[in-house]
Amino acid sequence: MTTIRLFGNDIKVIRLFGIQISPSPALKNNNMQLQRVDRFMNMPDSPPPSLRLAIQSVQGSRSLYMGWKYLENSDININLSRFLIPAEWCAKLLNHMTESESQKIQSEDDRGINVSVMDPRGDSHDMKFTEWKSLKRLVFNRGWNKLVENNQLQKGNLLHLWHFRTPDNRPCFAVNIIRS
């Protein structure tokens, strides 16, 4: 158990397997309340070992952690067939694209670029990476449904995304999924 001082109050905190248990003043008789804590906030920059090996097997390099997102219904809806990238990732992603790639991603004719997205098992899924003009958000589509189906993704699963490059400088991505 650890005691931390927050806003002048001492709080006792217990952390077990990424789940934080802390006393709740709302509960009587000193019962403990489970509180979900995002144990992934300080995710290391490198992918998990199995995914790192899969990236190395295609001679991928310069992997860069983009962020995490809890999957929503719209991300797994087969009729929408797309992964909506969180707004806070967009600038970071575009900064790691070449000028030509950025122009194609943001083009008015919705061309986008073809990318490969590696799933946690190391399987590669060809997709289109483009900007949806109506939302001014980046998306992976044309192939996203196959990744959802093959990995049995569900609402609430946590997705981590890394960007990397192949030896021919092609942009690729890798995702790790943590079941809810």
Image (tube, helix red, strand yellow):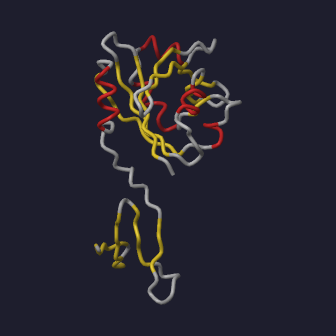
Could you say where residue 52 lies in the image, as x and y percent from the top left? Answer: 30, 31
Could you say where residue 36 lies in the image, as x and y percent from the top left? Answer: 47, 62
Looking at the image, which residue sits at the far right? Answer: 79
Q: Quadrant of the N terminus?
A: bottom left
Could you say where residue 48 lies in the image, as x and y percent from the top left? Answer: 32, 39
Q: Quadrant of residue 123?
A: top left
Image point 30% across, 72% down: which residue?
4
Total number of numbered discs in the rendering: 0
Q: Nearer the viewer, residue 48 or 8?
A: 48
Could you say where residue 42 lies in the image, as x and y percent from the top left? Answer: 34, 49
Q: Is residue 127 above or below residue 43?
A: above
> In the rendered view, does 138 fall on the left or right side of 14?
right
> In the rendered view, does 31 fall on the left or right side of 15?
right
> In the rendered view, does 47 fall on the left or right side of 110?
left
Q: Is residue 128 above or below residue 32?
A: above
Image point 35% across, 65% down: which residue?
16
Q: Is residue 97 above or below residue 168?
A: below
Image point 56% across, 40% down: which residue?
153
Q: Nearer the viewer, residue 174 or 179?
A: 179
